Each structure stands twice: as structure tokens, then as C-alpha cells.
Image: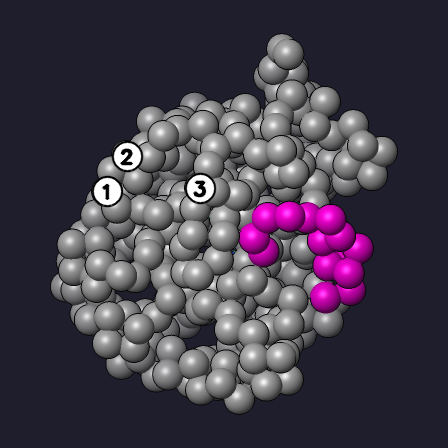
């Protein structure tokens, strides 16, 4: 089956980046609803997945490749992403209340670098809206569903933890795992939660809340994962590794987007505020993964995200100690074929 994505990409790249995003999701949902998505993308389906199943955090993942947070922010295309081969889909970031995000334009392609800069600012339908979307989009999805949580922009920094607790409580019944996003550069003060003491407190309270809500969900245990930035010093990574090991967090995602522009210096869009993702992030993100792996309790799994543009990039993350990988910008530039190539890797 020929790869139709290069053609689709030419059409999509002729549109404004955010418009292209909405068009893509609408087309995927329509193709999924009519049962032709797998044929159109030429990719494998989660119901008949490429790759081998693997157990991570006590959950059975159909393969080792997942969709990174931020592409399905509303949780309205979960089954469709499963159909193009993802073994897990992480939706969100969701906040307690709906919010519009930052002013447009807020999404930019740096085509010369296979990269994106975004400052979306957690545009999302809020916990309740997302749960409504999931009630139809998740039907028949056989992969693992992660729900990524954050804070509303209007919530003061000193009350940030309350927002995470509200989200955890709200999404607990729907999630297979929950990711606390401490690393988006587009919400003021969010990354300060990566300070070791604050992070310890956040994890402790999330774990407490989990124990509190478990009985309402038949004793279901939902793993909690922390997502960190690539812009942390070695010292900060070391301090966080200590906190993660001590609190027995269930997993860590390395990394989110970077605020560094070193790898795209001189590009016309270099000065756009926001997080940079894609090829310029690959090396730095894998270096953070390797550094954390060296310092973290070996029983705690790491999920590698950041510049996975080829199967070789994914392999480098597995070699650095990742149990799973996630893709966002690589999907925009390479299309669904990338998912299949990664899933087929023998790790
Ligand atoms: C447009 C866009 C929006 C994103 N939104 C979120 C988000 O809401 N929550 C989050 O944890 N990460 C978000 N991310 C970060 C991705 O999940 C991923 O960690 C990062 O882009 C690095 O991976 P990549 O190089 O494969 O894109 C976003 C990334 C992009 C490009």
C-alpha cells in the first residue's frame, strides 16, 4: 500500500497550522466513523497491532508507541488514533474548567527544521467536557488511555496543586494512567512545580487523593506519571530523581517541549514564544532521559517523548532506557507510517 501521507501533508501544509490541525482531526474522525481510516492511512489498527504487547506500570500496552499529549487535547479522537496504530493515546492537557488558551496565532511550523513552536496555553474543554467526548470517542478503543492534567491559567500559582487534585478526581474513572504535566512553558508558573520540594508535595497529595477516590471506583489503581521539561540542569534532574524514587511515582515522561532556540538559531520564527518540538529537540530530550535513567530507581519506567522523528530516534530512546515512546511532531512531518515503523522495532 503506497504511503499517501506525503500528498496529504502537501495539502495540509498549505493551510495555517492550527486550521490544518482541526481539518486533520475532523477527517480522521469521519474516516474512522465510516471504517476506512486504516485503509486511507495504510497503517495497522490497534485491534490488529504491529509490535508486541508489553507490560508497563502494571498495564498491558499493545505496543511501545503512543500519541503524546496535546494533539488530542479534547479527547475526541481516541479510537481514531488507535486505528492508526498507537498502542496508547494520551489526551489533554485537561484543566478543571474549560479555557480558550492563548491568542492566535499560537502554532508555527519551522519546516526547514522539521519542528514546531507552540504556545497553545492548554485550550481544552475542561474535565466535564472531556468526559463527554470520551463517552463516544473511546468506544471500542483497545489500547491504553492516558489523561494528562494541568492547572487553569486563572488559578494562582499557590493553588496549583488543588487544580491537579480536582483533575485527578474528575478523570480517575476514565483513565488507565494519569500524567501530571509540570513542564508546559505556556502556563505561567507551571514549571516551578518541578522544584524538588514542591514536586514531592504534589506527588504526595496526588497519591493521597488516589487512595481517597479508589473505593468509589471499585478499588481501581491508576498509575500516576510526571512529565518533565528538557530544560532542567543535571542538578535539578538529580534532585527530581531522588523525589521520584522516594515517593515511588509510577512513571516519568521525558520530555516536554524546550524553551531553548539554540538548534533553530537564525530561523525567521526563532523569536516566537512557546515550546519547540521535533527534530531540534531529539538529542537534548534523549540526554535528559539517559541522565534520569542513570539516577532513578530502576523499577520506575520512563516514557520517552521529544523529537522522535524516525524509528532510529525511537530506538535511541529505548537504548537510553525508555520503556515506551510517544510521538507528536513526528506524526505531523512523517504521518502514520512512522507509528508502524516504531511499533515494529524489536526492543
Ligand atoms: C502543538 C502542541 C501542543 C502540545 N500540548 C501539550 C499539552 O497540552 N500537554 C503536554 O503535556 N504536552 C503537550 N505538548 C508536548 C508534546 O506532548 C511532546 O511532549 C513534545 O512536543 C515533544 O515531542 P515531539 O517532539 O514528538 O513533538 C504539545 C506539543 C505540541 C507540538
* Residue corresponding to mark 2: 316
How packed mark 2 is, by other alpha carbons closer than 10 Å (few <14, some 14-19, many 20 or more), is some
Examine the structure image and report whether residue 5 is included in the region drawn in magenta. no
Q: Nearer the viewer, mark 3 or mark 1?
A: 3
- N-terminal of the pair, mark 3 or mark 1, is 3
Can you give x and y, in whole percent of width and height, for residue 142 in the image? 64, 48
Residue at horizontal 56 percent and vertical 40 percent from the top: 86
The one nearer the camera, 128 or 187, is 128
SS of the residue under disc 2: helix
The residue wearing badge 3 is: 64
142 part of magenta stretch: yes
Residue hosting label 1: 320
Image: magenta residue range: 131-145
Q: Considering depth in this image, is 15 or 291 the residue closer to the camera?
A: 291
Q: Is residue 40 left or right of residue 110?
A: right
Whether residues under marks 2 and 3 lie with C-beta atoms below 8 angstroms apart, the answer is no
Q: Is residue 151 above or below residue 215?
A: above
Tag 1: Cα neighbours inside 10 Å, few (<14), some, or many (≥20)? Answer: many
Residue at the far top in the pictured view: 2
Residue 16 shows in the view: no
Examine the rendered structure and indicate whether residue 318 appears above or below residue 313. Answer: below
- Earlier residue among tags 2 and 3: 3
Q: Relative to the observer, which residue lies in front, 104 or 247? A: 247
Q: Are marks 2 and 1 in contact (CB under 8 Å)?
A: yes
Between the residue at mark 3 and the residue at mark 1, the CA separation in whole angstroms equals 15 Å
Q: Secondary structure at mark 3?
A: loop
Q: Kindly report which numbered mark, 2 or 3, lies closer to the viewer in this rendering.
A: 3
Who's the residue at 59% across and 65% down the image?
Answer: 175
Q: Is mark 2 within 8 Å of ligand 1?
A: no
The N terminus: image quadrant: top right
Residue found 74% across the figure and 30% down from its top = 37
Answer whether residue 244 is visible to the viewer in this image: yes
Amino acid at each position: 500500500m503506497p504511503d499517501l501521507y506525503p500528498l496529504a501533508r502537501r495539502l495540509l501544509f498549505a493551510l495555517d497550522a492550527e486550521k490544518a490541525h482541526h481539518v486533520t482531526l475532523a477527517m480522521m474522525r469521519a474516516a474512522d466513523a465510516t471504517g476506512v481510516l486504516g485503509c486511507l492511512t495504510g497503517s495497522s489498527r490497534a485491534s490488529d497491532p504491529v509490535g508486541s504487547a508489553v507490560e508497563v506500570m502494571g498495564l498491558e500496552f499493545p505496543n511501545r508507541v503512543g500519541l503524546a499529549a496535546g494533539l488530542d487535547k479534547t479527547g475526541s479522537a481516541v479510537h481514531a488514533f488507535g486505528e492508526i496504530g498507537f498502542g496508547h493515546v494520551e489526551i489533554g492537557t485537561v484543566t478543571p474548567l474549560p479555557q480558550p488558551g492563548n491568542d492566535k496565532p499560537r502554532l508555527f511550523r519551522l519546516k526547514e527544521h522539521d519542528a514546531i513552536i507552540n504556545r497553545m496555553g492548554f485550550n481544552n474543554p475542561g474535565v466535564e467536557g472531556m468526559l463527554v467526548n470520551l463517552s463516544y470517542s473511546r468506544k471500542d478503543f483497545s489500547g491504553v488511555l492516558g489523561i494528562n492534567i494541568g492547572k487553569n491559567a486563572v488559578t494562582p500559582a499557590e493553588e496549583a496543586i488543588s487544580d491537579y487534585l480536582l483533575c485527578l478526581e474528575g478523570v480517575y474513572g476514565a483513565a488507565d494512567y494519569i500524567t501530571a504535566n509540570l513542564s508546559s512553558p505556556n502556563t505561567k508558573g507551571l514549571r516551578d512545580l518541578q522544584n524538588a520540594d514542591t514536586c514531592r508535595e504534589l506527588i504526595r497529595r496526588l497519591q493521597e487523593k488516589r487512595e481517597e477516590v479508589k473505593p468509589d471506583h471499585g478499588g481501581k489503581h491508576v498509575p500516576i506519571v510526571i512529565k518533565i521539561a528538557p530544560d532542567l540542569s543535571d542538578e535539578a534532574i538529580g534532585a527530581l530523581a531522588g523525589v521520584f524514587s522516594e515517593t515511588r511515582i509510577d512513571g516519568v515522561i521525558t520530555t516536554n517541549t524546550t524553551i531553548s532556540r539554540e538548534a533553530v538559531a537564525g530561523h525567521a520564527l526563532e523569536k516566537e514564544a512557546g515550546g519547540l518540538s521535533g527534530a531540534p529537540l531529539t538529542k537534548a530530550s534523549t540526554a535528559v532521559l539517559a541522565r534520569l535513567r542513570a539516577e532513578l530507581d530502576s523499577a520506575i519506567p520512563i516514557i520517552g517523548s521529544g523529537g522522535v522523528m524516525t524509528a532510529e530516534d525511537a530506538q535511541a530512546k529505548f537504548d537510553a532506557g525508555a520503556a515506551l515512546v510517544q510521538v507528536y511532531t513526528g506524526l505531523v512531518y512523517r504521518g502514520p507510517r512512522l507509528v508502524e515503523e516504531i511499533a515494529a522495532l524489536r526492543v
